[in-house]
Image: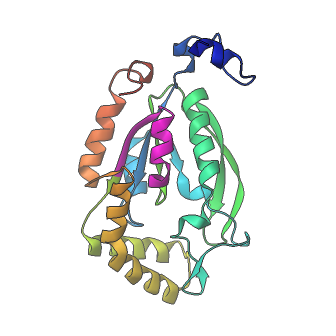
Amino acid sequence: MTDSAAISSEPDALFDVPPEARRPRVRVVLLTGPSGSGKSALVRRLGLPAVMLDDFYLDGDHPGLPRRFGIVDWDDAGSWDQDGALEALRTLATTGRAELPVYDIPTNRRTGTTVLDTAGAPLVVAEGVFAAELVAACRAEGFLADAICLRRPRLVTFWFRFLRDVAEARKPLPTLMRRGWALLRAEPAMVGRWAAQGCRPTTPVQAERDIRALARVTPPENVIGS
């Protein structure tokens, strides 16, 4: 049996569809890094369509959530809806439009949804501490443009994270301090793990240059599989 015959024998197969029709409209840049490393600030500077992967956190009363410091461990990927995040990126890549959750971190729950329309942009930036969890799947499905881990001095990251968390009243001050020091100590191992998952560590300045260059390249249908 030929390959085409095998494909067409499956009821859900996309047979009789030319290859170019299955190419993604948009490619995805996955952007990770320690909390406070400058991911959100970089996304704002870029001005590209963006998915905040933190919005895929599970509600705080979801059964079986990991715990640490007397609260849910929001730095554990078990607190996050990986399948939902991947499906949203897949939908964006193939249609250019997707419905996304809106998450309120102080109350630990989703508060609604929003629709992201890429409006013809060649790239979407998906940023969050769990972005590396999606590298293998996005690459296998052909819509990964790049996978980047932001890295800068640990004390700088600690300070900016602390200022942000206090300003947004994310958690009680003692909890923020305990979590902050734990993340400071764990940061080298975290960066190493993300690199092993396929993200390349770089500075925010270099990452911005690289992503802007990607946004200027040939449209995605001409670079699939690169």
Residue at 61 percent across and 75 percent down: it is 66
User: Which image quadrant is residue 81 in?
Assistant: bottom right
Name the residue furthest bottom: 174
Q: Is residue 7 visible?
A: yes
Residue at 47 percent across and 56 percent down: it is 128
Q: Is residue 124 visible?
A: no
Q: For the C terminus, which image quadrant?
A: top left
Task: Give 88 or 101, whichever is nearer the viewer.
Answer: 88
Task: Give 47 or 64, whichever is nearer the viewer.
Answer: 64
Is 13 displayed left or right of 188 in the figure?
Answer: right
Is 125 displayed left or right of 74 in the figure?
Answer: left
Q: Position of residue 46 (x, y in %)?
A: 38, 42
Q: Is residue 223 magenta?
A: no
Q: Is residue 132 magenta?
A: yes
For the magenta stretch, what is the residue range?
Answer: 131-148
Task: Give 44 or 126, whichever is nearer the viewer.
Answer: 126
Compared with 133, 13 (above or below) is: above
Compared with 162, 213 (above or below) is: above
Q: Position of residue 208 (x, y in %)?
A: 30, 45
Q: Position of residue 91 (x, y in %)?
A: 62, 35
Name the residue furthest front: 1
Q: Position of residue 64 (x, y in %)?
A: 69, 73
